[in-house]
Amino acid sequence: MWILFLLFASVYAQNDVSQWYQSPPKKYSIAGIEIEGVENIDKNVLKYLTGISVGDVIQIPGDKTADAIKNLMKQGMFDDVELYVDKILNNEAFIRIKVTEKPRLSKFTFLGKIKKHDADEIREKIRLVREKIITDYTIGNIKNTIREYYVNKGYYFTQVEITQEPDKTAKTPHVILYIKINKGKQVKIKNINFYGNSALSSGKLRRSMKETKRKRWWNIFNSGKYLEENLEKDLPNIIEKYNARGYRDARIVKDTVYFVEKYRVNIDIHIEEGHKYYFGKFYWHGNSKYRSGQLDTILNIKEGEIFNQHKLDQKLFMNPNGYDISSLYM
């Protein structure tokens, strides 16, 4: 909220006040600027932020006075800014800017069933410290940070309510924040459906996904919780499974996650398998130290064998035992 007031003491006025309101805006030289209502902020800094300095000639009311109020409001530190013209002497104006500071934080506390380690981690993430200015943005950021924290743990319906209570023991406006958290239930995976797969069964593809599993009551070791991060890690595992079977062009066309119940999702994965490839004949060029037959023996991949990119890379460069083609030339 911002207001521009023009108040004049009759002893200083050169004209009748009623005549002032009826007259058009006029230019004045600023003879004084007073800041009122601040306790925790340097007044000189606020004067600078207004964009008006003593000696400036400005129109009152006008764009400069409106901008001064806007400049202070956009700092996010005030609930209200009012600009008064206290007196006029000849063509000199004395202005007073009254501000209402936003409250600052005294302390905060969590409400709800929250585990200690969760509360400790959330404190680190929301970074609330005493004397922090509490704005609507601050409240929104706290809520979003807490929701994101629980989403990363599989709780997609976490509710966060924040109430502010004035701290009656403080001399200046301070508040106590009560942060109530209801994390709800974890979202579980009901089913993982594959479409477009014929070379590999859906069961084999599900087993290639290390972290993303369906919730099954008989498997006590698998929570079946859905985490977007885990799904992103597991999708390449599906392609690796195809690559190992000779399908080097296999790709995931699209994947979709959708709720089938409030706390249950299905995952649909559409696959384009492509053609199956086989190793052909190997030809060696530039080898003088070792004969082609010796290199064939170390490579140990036969013509007509199903193409496997991982196996080829390992035979050429990455054998953990060091028995690969590149190690011969080191």
Image (cartoon, rainbow, N blue to C red):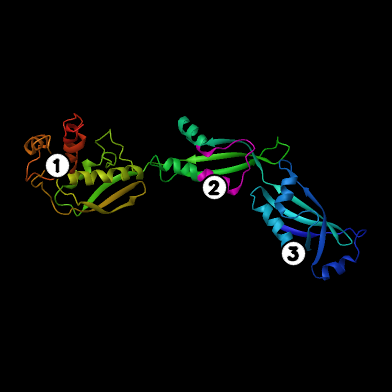
Q: Are marks 3 and 1 in contact (CB under 8 Å)?
A: no
- Nearer the observer: mark 1 or 2; the answer is 1
Let me know if residue 327 appears in the view. yes
What residue sits 8% from the left and 36% below the top? 291
Circle on res. 209: none
Which residue has dot 2 on it? 140
Q: Find the distance from the CA under tag 2 to the CA under tag 3.
A: 34 Å
| Mark 1, residue position | 286
Sequence-earlier tag: 2 or 3: 3
Magenta segment includes 39: no
Q: Which of marks 3 and 1 is nearer the N terminus?
A: 3
Residue type for callout 2: Gly
Residue nearest the viewer, comparing 299 with 330: 330
Determine the secondary structure under disc 3: loop
Left/right placement of residue 43 relative to residue 295 reads: right
Q: Quadrant of the N terminus?
A: bottom right
Q: In this view, does 27 lie above or below 316?
A: below
| Separation of residues labelled 3 and 1 (CA atoms) | 83 Å
- Kindly report which numbered mark, 3 or 1, lies closer to the viewer in this rendering: 1
Q: Position of residue 132 (x, y in %)?
A: 62, 40
Q: Is mark 1 on a helix, strand or loop?
A: loop
Percent x, y of residue 160: 50, 44
The amino acid marked with disc number 1 is Gly
The residue depicted at 80 percent of the width and 65 percent of the height is 27
Of labels 1 and 2, earlier in sequence is 2
Measured Cα–Cα span from mark 1 to mark 2:
66 Å
Is 135 contained in the magenta span? yes
Asked if the residue under mark 2 is in contact with the one under mark 1, i.e. CB atoms within 8 Å, the reply is no
In the rendered image, which residue does mark 3 sit on?
62
Q: Nearer the viewer, mark 2 or mark 3?
A: 3
Q: What stretch is highlighted in magenta?
A: 125-143
Q: Which residue lies furthest to the front in this view?
A: 288
